[in-house]
Amino acid sequence: MSPRPRKVSDEDVFAATYRTMGRLGPTELTLAEIAAEVGVTAGALVQRFGSKRELLLALSAGAANSAGDLIRSLRATARSPLAAVRAYADCLAQLAASPAALARNLAYLQIDLSDPDFRKHLLVQARATRRGLEELLEEARAKGEIVRRTDVVRLARAVETMLSGTMLTWAVYRDGSARQWMRDDLDAVLAPYLAKRTSGSGKSA
């Protein structure tokens, strides 16, 4: 008697897909590779999702729908809202763990930008992330971490733009780690907005 096919959830498949994408670029990625990673047959994935494109679209939709969860989870464990912003930068830096890893991720981003079906999910994800950054900065302003006059909408946009740009700049120079570059540039962007504490008063300047 042949063994029963292994039952896996969509979440298992998505996690395996992310891991496989971490090793392979878009032209190398196949359902067979993903199936081997999750421990099922390629036919099982075809039966469930229809094609590699449909699987990747489902993955993209899931990422879009849960985009705000990442920043909320970072805030839940961070000591302060600005610490959560820095933790988000560290998470984003994982996309550039190496120049080769960043090149693969940029190849997938090219698909997200050029294919309308993928781009709509990318836009949802980006807007949720931007709003998450705005909420962290709003909280930082309320708690006196940044000055009260800060325009958190503009600052969130600047942070978002800087982090993406820093990854590309690091990929050119390849001096140190992308994580450190992103930390340094984030500190530079935030520096003009940090509230100075009046000695002994506990009040922000």
Image (spheres, helix red, strand yellow):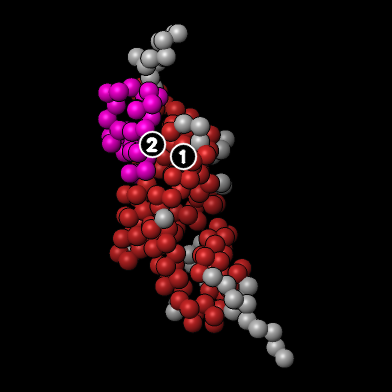
Which portion, as a residue range, is magenta? 130-159
Residue density around tag 2, few if under 14, some if 14–19, many if 20 or more, within 10 Å:
many
Secondary structure of residue under mark 2? helix
Q: Three-letter amino acid code at disc 1?
A: Arg
What quarter of the picture does the C terminus occupy? top left
Q: Is residue 153 above or below residue 36?
A: above
- Specify the quadrant of the image occupied by residue 135: top left
Q: Which mark is residue 90?
A: none
Sequence order check: which comes first, mark 2 or mark 1?
Answer: 1
Residue 118 at x, y percent in the picture: 35, 63
Does residue 71 appear to the left or right of 20 in the view shown? left
Q: Which mark is residue 75?
A: 1
Q: Is residue 110 visible?
A: no
Q: Three-letter amino acid code at disc 2?
A: Leu
Residue at the (46%, 48%) spot, across then down: 70
Q: Nearer the viewer, residue 59 or 97?
A: 59
Residue 107 at x, y percent in the picture: 44, 58
The main secondary structure of the magenta stretch is helix
Q: Is residue 165 above or below residue 33?
A: above
Does residue 152 appear to the left or right of 92 in the view shown? left
- Specify the quadrant of the image occupied by residue 141: top left
Residue 103 at x, y percent in the picture: 49, 53
Residue at the (30%, 33%) spot, across then down: 152
Q: Is residue 25 visible?
A: yes
Q: Mark 2 touching mark 1, by CB under 8 A?
A: yes
- Between the C-alphas of marks 2 and 1, the distance is 8 Å
